[in-house]
Image: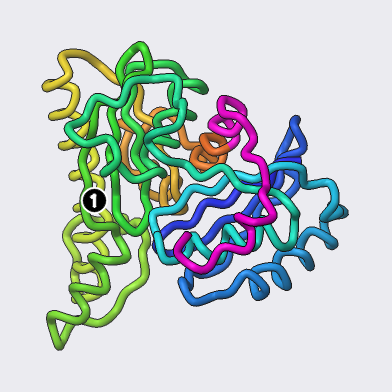
Amino acid sequence: MLLVVDAGNTNVVVAVHDGAQWRGIWRVATDPQRTSDEYAVWLLTLLNLSGVKREEVSAAVIGTVVPAALYHLRRLCRDWFDVEPLIARATLDWGFDIKVDNPEEVGADRLLNALAGHRTYGGPLVVIDFGTATTFDVVDRDGAYLGGVIAPGINLSIEALHRAAARLPRIGIGRPQAVIGRGTVSAMQSGIYWGYVAMIEGLVARIQTEYGGRLKVIATGGLAPLLAEGTTVIGHINPDLTLDGLRMLAERNPVPTLSRERARLPEGE
């Protein structure tokens, strides 16, 4: 089985794939100080509840945009599953060209979404990922990654609005029926929800104009279903797109060999 780890700024998502389907997908809050042993206590309990034995894991792949979390996640794979994880980097075999000025600057999650999006839906397409940041990533007809857009995520915007304006409360995210709010909370909810819907529609339209043709629009991330309710621009919702990208990347690249000497390297190596 393949152990898949997607470490984002907000959550670390860990999943196990048996070659045919996902046997389990679990989330824990991102904490760069969480040790490999703490991850193991959490994960091994969940694996046991799902009927998966630790010895069944034969390979692992990690994608992260949080460099400080990588050491402990790598140690989790080495110490508790006896495998050397494949680390998602621009230098691996992605099966497509990365047509940006500096490929190594591109977050692993964006390349993973591009890989899974094109393999699943074909191109050209734009993948919108509603995470800590809201990202738009453009993929050509042949699968080449062309770059994209990075905007603040919805939760970041809500928190910034609350902190910067003393009289504005912290609000939840929901779809208001009316655009014109008749109170402070409803006005804020409208600004957040319909403002992001307008951003989605506006940016997709501008991307398509610049690209010179229509693109399929794929959405992923926890808020994708909610925002898709407010627009017809989004054609497909796939909550597991990044995990699928990690699985596909592992299929394309050789399984790293666990070296006992390497396994004992100090932090940072």
Q: Which residue is at the front of the view, 214 or 72? A: 72
Q: Which residue is at the front of the view, 266 or 132? A: 266
Q: Quadrant of residue 20?
A: top right
Relative horizontal placement of residue 233, taking residue 54 as reference (left or right): left
| Picture mark count | 1
Q: Quadrant of residue 79?
A: bottom right
Compared with 143, 262 (above or below) is below
Residue 22 on the magenta span: no
Compared with 135, 233 (above or below) is above
The N terminus, quarter of image = top right
**Residue with the mark numbered 1:** 196
Question: x, y percentage for residue 124?
Answer: 33, 17
Q: The magenta stretch spans which residues? A: 247-269
Relative horizontal placement of residue 79, taking residue 180 as reference (left or right): right
Quick check: can you spot residue 229? Answer: no
Name the residue rendered at 28%, 28% in the picture: 138
Name the residue rendered at 20%, 73% in the picture: 160
Question: x, y percentage for residue 125?
Answer: 34, 23
Compared with 255, 6 (above or below) is below
Dot 1 amino acid type: Tyr
Residue at the far front: name it.
Answer: 261
Residue at the far bottom: name it.
Answer: 166
Name the residue rendered at 31%, 74% in the picture: 171
Relative horizontal placement of residue 162, taking residue 89 as reference (left or right): left
Question: x, y percentage for residue 168?
Answer: 19, 81
